[in-house]
Image (cartoon, coloured by chain):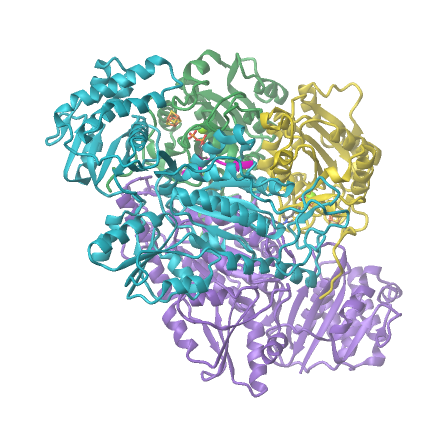
Chain colours: A green, B yellow, C cyan, D purple
Amino acid sequence: MNLGKADTHPAWCPGCGNYPILKTLDDALKEADVDPSRLVLVSGIGQAAKAPHYVDRKTNIFNGLHGRALPAATGIKLANHKLHVIITSGDGDMYGEGGNHFIHAVRRNIGIKCFVHDNQVYGLTKGQASPTSDMGFVTKVQLHGVINLPMNPIALAIVEGASFVARSFSGDTGHLKAMMIAAIQTDGFALLDILQPCISFNRVNTFKWYKDRVRPIGEGHDPFDRDAALRLAFKWGEEIPIGIFYCSGRPSMESQIEVLKEKSLVEQYG
Amino acid sequence: MNLGKADTHPAWCPGCGNYPILKTLDDALKEADVDPSRLVLVSGIGQAAKAPHYVDRKTNIFNGLHGRALPAATGIKLANHKLHVIITSGDGDMYGEGGNHFIHAVRRNIGIKCFVHDNQVYGLTKGQASPTSDMGFVTKVQLHGVINLPMNPIALAIVEGASFVARSFSGDTGHLKAMMIAAIQTDGFALLDILQPCISFNRVNTFKWYKDRVRPIGEGHDPFDRDAALRLAFKWGEEIPIGIFYCSGRPSMESQIEVLKEKSLVEQYG
Amino acid sequence: MDINIRVAGEAGQGVASAGDLLAQSLAMMGLHVLATQSYMSRIRGGLNWYDVRISDRELFAGREKADLLVALTDEALETLRETVALGGAILSESSKADGTIHIDFTQAAVEAGGAKMMANTVATGAVYALLGYEVEDLCRQLSEVFKNKSGDILAQNVACARKGFELTRAYRGKVKGPAPVGAPGALYSGAESIALAASSGGVKFYIAYPMSPSTATLNFMAKASDRYGIVVEQAEDEIAAVNMACGAAYAGVPAMTGTSGGGFALMVEGLSLAGITELPIVIMVAQRPGPATGLPTRTAQGELKFAISAGHGEFARAIYAPGSPQQCYDLTRLALETAHKYQTPAIILTDQFLQDLQKNIPPLDDTPRPINRCIVTDAGEDYARYAVTESGISPRAIPGGPAKVLVDSDEHDESGHITEDLGIHLAQHDKRMRKLQGMTAEAIGPELYGPDSAEMLLVCWGSTYMPCREAVDSLNASGESAAMLHFAQVWPINVATAGQKLGRRRRVICVEGNATGQLASVLRETGIIGEVELLLRYDGMPFTAEYIVERIKS
Amino acid sequence: MDINIRVAGEAGQGVASAGDLLAQSLAMMGLHVLATQSYMSRIRGGLNWYDVRISDRELFAGREKADLLVALTDEALETLRETVALGGAILSESSKADGTIHIDFTQAAVEAGGAKMMANTVATGAVYALLGYEVEDLCRQLSEVFKNKSGDILAQNVACARKGFELTRAYRGKVKGPAPVGAPGALYSGAESIALAASSGGVKFYIAYPMSPSTATLNFMAKASDRYGIVVEQAEDEIAAVNMACGAAYAGVPAMTGTSGGGFALMVEGLSLAGITELPIVIMVAQRPGPATGLPTRTAQGELKFAISAGHGEFARAIYAPGSPQQCYDLTRLALETAHKYQTPAIILTDQFLQDLQKNIPPLDDTPRPINRCIVTDAGEDYARYAVTESGISPRAIPGGPAKVLVDSDEHDESGHITEDLGIHLAQHDKRMRKLQGMTAEAIGPELYGPDSAEMLLVCWGSTYMPCREAVDSLNASGESAAMLHFAQVWPINVATAGQKLGRRRRVICVEGNATGQLASVLRETGIIGEVELLLRYDGMPFTAEYIVERIKS
Ligand SMILES: Cc1ncc(C[n+]2csc(CCOP(=O)(O)OP(=O)(O)O)c2C)c(N)n1
Ligand SMILES: Cc1ncc(C[n+]2csc(CCOP(=O)(O)OP(=O)(O)O)c2C)c(N)n1
Ligand code: SF4
Ligand code: SF4
Ligand SMILES: [Mg+2]
Ligand SMILES: [Mg+2]
């Protein structure tokens, strides 16, 4: 049965926070002058994970398994570290199913830019709690509300030494674009956690909820100060900081591998 | 071929740091008056993971898959939360293969006591780097030395909100026993990372290396102060703090589940 | 008499609630109802549809064609118009299309004083008019559905239903529905039937990671959790789920998990764990088309051979493949019982078609009737978990009492302690494998439907039961001589019983929802059949009787 | 002439280095050598042994019995004494045992000016004396082994070897070794042969998580990495490993991973990913006894059916099962080629026995000879990754050039974009499955060894090649009429070719290292054989010719 051709037109709900993220990604890639031929967009499975199919300028895509965007991206980056490798995926994908890869990609500090559309819910599977869901969040599975402490991916990325750790908000595209470009320009692993309203399944953390709370991190913050970064990372509630929390200054994994000093593996083939 | 009966006699190398940990576990269980009938020792696979077979007083054992001690223990604890559930396993088991479960068990704050024999190496598989291996550590696989930042399990457990986060050393059995008992008496998730020399495969972090460095955390430290705990958690090198880093004061998962308010699931059966 | 109503529109337009409302109200009236769902992997937009088939005799499957199409969008109309049967009618929101009955559902909803999104209720009213039924029957069901909502919402919906009915009065009875026959009033989906058997059967721990089409069962388990005293937890991943299930089973409560192919792939190491530690866990695998993510919301029967061979090393497992909601209930209970009797994993193979399918059947027993866990309670200090026995089944104690219970994923001796002794390994391995003898002897044989003497035999498993059964009736009605052999248990297979029922036929056709004929392979492997014809469908849609009959005749 | 030397002692005593030293020096002398290892899952203590079998004709397998046992501990003596062949000799550290040649290896080492742990070198000197060889040949090999160590270490070892030789001079030639015949000088293990084929064949990315008995290959790859320019990385888990391999393959370099059954279980979802994204990855699965952790350091052939059916959904894969180090080399290269030609995963099934086994063969080619990746380099902007073709193979480009390469674990259209269109799904699914036709046509047929007309046929796969081959020789020598049919490729199977070689035999016996006869099942399923005899061994030890012959005759 012909149910319409391939989906290069977003299959997202009207009003979803993924739209401005997609648009901003397009803009950031252009502004950072990323050649689509030398870019691979990697994702797992989920609503956010469909984003690579929708970008403006056709590029390379690896839309892998749920939770496995990071290892796929790692393989790509190690095989051809001269490519830009950007992940755009969901919170469940990255912090739930993919949690172990997240820890270890950060430790490796591999030069992957990881944009997490954090809607604090599992969108595609219709609204279960995600690792970042707030306590008390009620779903069809968590009937009495979530009792786990929400995962703190920002703090985790800081303590395990990522090159770049930031948060932004889909509702502030100017800020978001700046963060994306800064991440793209980082050597090493970059985490950009993006607050993203899900209008269908998250009736708590709405656009307004985020809008009322997000506060750009002040000029005074030194992102090389880990202690300060961590203190900021625990702010969640009436005020939610957005901006660059932390920069570790560590060299990227690929820059430390002898075999990759001159040419990429792909260039060395044959 | 008869290669000897079941191994209830330790199959560890003479001089291995696992011996004092085992002995101290025996002592701590006695001193904390843990009834072996109401105890389950859980482990994964590795040298450390064999420990449950060797304890002094026969008890219940679930020696599961490599990396999966935590989910098995979680299932046990939720099915019968009136049992003591103690994990005794290795660093590779808990932080490598089992990393995702570690994050989420901490978030759940389920009442499992997790004793990690941290020898900074994969012992049973003959000496590859583990997630906690120091940078530069040379092995048959990491021929040019480890380039990843060692994982910081203490910091991870702190930022994700464990009830109890501590470190001890197999060479200081008095300290170790105190930590074990404190962990056992905690409500909620307890991480006890135990520095353990591996005489066969870790020629860097030897008994002497640890002995020269470990320093009990001072009286002045307030384990409810997360910032202070984190500052301590990053001390590694000339001085390595041992003791209780952090207590979150969060209630355990099982205490928050309505169905478990009165009886355990097992008691409710039938 | 047999009418198929197809409600179609975008995700988020209330296709499913309109379908549910129709299915429930028509069932309540005493009609035989069979409802199936087709939807895309998205939350809004796209094209979903919901078929409600009604009849005065029992129904088993869906149909390719619709007698009445309700198109809530232009796309629905364009794509599905060709599926309308000769003499059928189309109710359409679009005014542009010829040959359809045009109703502006949305406008009508507003005119009736309701919200725009009540357009779907307007549509149900119109359907009632076309079928020639009384709108009061629909309104009664609305009262049921909205009984916990504010009175306003109910009143608005009733007004919308009436409005739809009024607007279509001119076409009253155009697609005449069958007369009610007092069919049983309760609709059950496969997903719910499994959850009902699990919760009433004593599952105390249900652990899963969301994955279509298994999630519906997870939702039902959550809903049942307070009543039955079940801990329902969302795992961080499927590996955690299966290992938690093992832990809970060890501690003494029936434990279950549910997933789809991709999640099951991640559970395979844990399956082996249950095999060697001899723990009774039940895994529901709700199939969908692969490989990998494939088509997440469609149906398939692609995991038979995978389920049979999944896991490293060799161990006993039982695999059930229910063919209807009733079988979902019965076999889930049996899976729990077999897992506990034999202390080994059991798998339930279902699929999207059966998970979502609803059928009215006599009420399933929801009273708590916990299965026998087959545990010993009098074991003492000298207890050995893995005592070598002739049946392969060792007396099983649970921790907490005087008997210490030791289990190990390494090879172990009778006490459960790790061993590297090769003689002990052999004894334990043989002990574990011996369970297969009892399991095979007890395996439920395939069900033969249709005349014993039939020349043509449709061999199938799992959800294909329903369309095959209807195909057999239809073939026989058209003068063929056909029967069906359905395997509700696909592993282990009792070769003797199965072979006997197979008999000697002129044509043997395996009807399966995969591209390679997996049951045919398994039956060949076990020596039951040789070469057979394959009738395979793997486009993501479920079989229907029409589809099978047409393929057989062409 | 055929002598089996068994060196046994605790882990950590240098059993393996003594064995290696003997194997290498005896091979260097021009003897045919076959070395196998048996060890426990511990680093110190327990009981390990190392067999070095030597002969003046080519050897293929180990032997149950030893002609010369070197017992470094009492336990070794007690346990293995019964394995000494009639007329054999025992060299023993223990003075308590009768009927053995007692040497205090440790004391002798110290007396010779060496360290205590050089006891094993003393033992090798004694072995040389008993075999009637010259100690100089042993010393030459010592110079080779210790060439990078300080001169002292070498001198001490040489002194120890001489000391052992001297102390046993009285027994010179008691277990007379065969005369050298100029056998090829290079010893290769299965593990190394696979690594050599992989590194010379162009694998640029080897990713693994340590797991016995696959780790030896990982170590060899690490060793080869600088020379060949390979990134060898340790993954955080096996799921990461397989997904990283997919990523690297996508980016354009041959990528490989290695594991054992438990790790493979975790890779199964990723296997499906490679199936639908059509990525050429190679997975080495080194089998050991399961289920679950089982016996980590023993051997088994338990993963055949699992490997064939692993993964949800249906897709093409090639599975090779080498039977010797030479086949390890050849088939690893072929696995890489097939994976790339057909853009689909290939699996190499090996096992502990073959991983550790060493045999001297003509030198394997270690010059870099990268395989053809079968990529297109002229694709432009309009490139579509999944163009539908008759062969099922779509032209494959890699990212970095003008052609954009889109891959998706969801069903996708020709361009690689996600789709839910059922027609496109069918076209893509059929395209992927069509590859199996070419793969089947090209599949290497089973090798028939022995007379064409043999009445008895031993059917086997993988490492059982070697003992079966010897068993055939031995059976024929004893007046039977036997041949062997060995499957080096176990999936897909070319039914016609295989059936032809099978012919009509009086007795067909499947010889397999598992408890259920998995190859027999597969051959039944594919219609090649019917009921056959099974000769199974699953105690964790490898087959030997003696074992097979004895079981056949009894
Ligand atoms: C192994 C596996 N488990 C489960 C799923 C089902 N699944 C698909 S998307 C998803 C969650 C998506 O949540 P998130 O990553 O937060 O993305 P969102 O839809 O919210 O953008 C799940 C559980 C799957 N595809 N594969
Ligand atoms: C799925 C799986 N992968 C790999 C292994 C092999 N394995 C056994 S123990 C081990 C590492 C053990 O390291 P650690 O947990 O640090 O324990 P240690 O031996 O150092 O005490 C590994 C990789 C396994 N058993 N299962
Ligand atoms: S379900 Fe939520 S995340 Fe998904 S498209 Fe809709 S609004 Fe966006
Ligand atoms: S290898 Fe290391 S960890 Fe294992 S027993 Fe020996 S010393 Fe202990
Ligand atoms: Mg999300
Ligand atoms: Mg360790």
Quadrant in which the C terminus of chain B is drawn: top right
Residue at x 38% of width, y 44% of height: C324
* Residue A144 on the magenta segment: no
Which is more toward the observer, D117 or B62?
A: B62
**Where in the figure is residue D114, as x and y percent of width and height?**
84, 62
B114 relative to D465 in the view: left or right: right
Question: Which segment is the magenta one?
Answer: C205-215
Which is more toward the observer, C457 or C244?
A: C457
> In this orientation, does residue A135 appear?
yes
Residue at x 46% of width, y 74% of height: D447
Quadrant in which the N terminus of chain B is drawn: bottom right
Which is more toward the observer, A128 or D118?
A: A128
**Where in the figure is residue C83, as x and y percent of width and height?**
19, 40
Q: Is residue D323 above or below residue B34?
A: below
**Where in the figure is residue D264, as x and y percent of width and height?**
53, 52
B236 relative to C42 in the view: left or right: right
Residue at x 30% of width, y 63% of height: C453
> In this orientation, does residue D410 appear?
no
Quadrant where ligand 3 appears? top left
- Res C390 quadrant in image: bottom right
- Res C177 quadrant in image: top left
Q: Residue furthest left?
A: C98
Q: Is residue D289 above or below residue B16?
A: below
Which is more toward the observer, D472 or A23?
A: D472
- Res A102 quadrant in image: top right
Residue at x 25% of width, y 26% of height: C124
